[in-house]
Image (cartoon, rainbow, N blue to C red):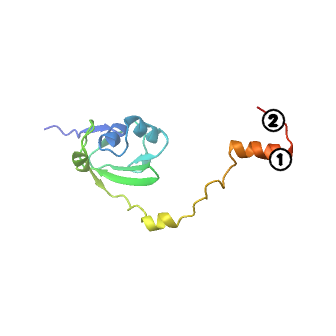
Amino acid sequence: MSGAQPSTRVDSWIWSVRLTKTRSAAATACRGGHVKVNGTPAKPAQHVAIGDEVRLRAAGRDRIVEVTRVVSKRVGPPAAAECFIDRSPPPPPKELLAALPQRDRGSGRPTKRERRETDRLLGRPDVG
């Protein structure tokens, strides 16, 4: 038995264990600085090995996982769950999300129709 520990690219591993939907999304997250391996920002080609901590910011949520098995091909959900230990903080409760203020429909920027009506009322020339 050799002393070399198996490793694979971080973008490939993140995609393989279903933390992102596509490998290109995983690579984009790495390039955008949303992936850290052992506390340092990771490039897509950086290798991960068993015992590494991978932090990923995806879909507005922080995921913190510890690598327990290295895979380079996408695996099914039951097998993916065995490849890491999830140490992520729990998502906020739905009651808290429902209490956040939301903008009423139509209270943002005016629509094209509303801008044209405003221009007509103010007597501005029709540009279009």
What residue is drawn where x is 16% and y is 37%? 2
| Residue 45 seen anywhere in this rendered image of the structure | no
Q: In the displayed structure, does residue 71 sit left or right of residue 128? A: left
Amino acid tagged 2: Asp
- Residue 5 numbered tag: none
Side (left or right) of 37 relative to 117: left
Query: Could you tell whether 51 is left or right of 109 in the image?
Result: left
Where's residue 102, x and y in %?
A: 57, 60
Mark sitting earlier along the chain (1/2) = 1
Residue 121, disc? 1
| Residue 79: image location, x then y, percent | 21, 46
Q: Is residue 115 left or right of residue 7?
A: right
For numbered disc 1, what is the local secondary structure?
Answer: helix
Say which residue label 2 marks.
126
Residue at horizontal 85 percent and vertical 46 percent from the top: 122
Furthest toward the right, the residue is: 123
Question: Extreme left residue here?
Answer: 1
* Residue that appears at 42% across and 47% down: 36
Decide: few, some or many residues near mark 1? Use Cα within 10 Å; few <14, some 14-19, many ≥20: few
Alpha carbon distance from label 1 to label 2: 11 Å
Q: Secondary structure at mark 2?
A: loop
Q: Quadrant of the N terminus?
A: top left
Q: Is residue 62 above or below residue 7?
A: below
> Does residue 4 sit above or below 84 in this rendering?
above
Residue shown at 47% from the left, 38% from the top: 31
Indicate the position of residue 73 as horizontal and vertical percent values: 26, 35
Are dots 1 and 2 in contact, CB under 8 Å? no
Instruction: Determine which quarter of the picture holds residue 128.
Output: top right
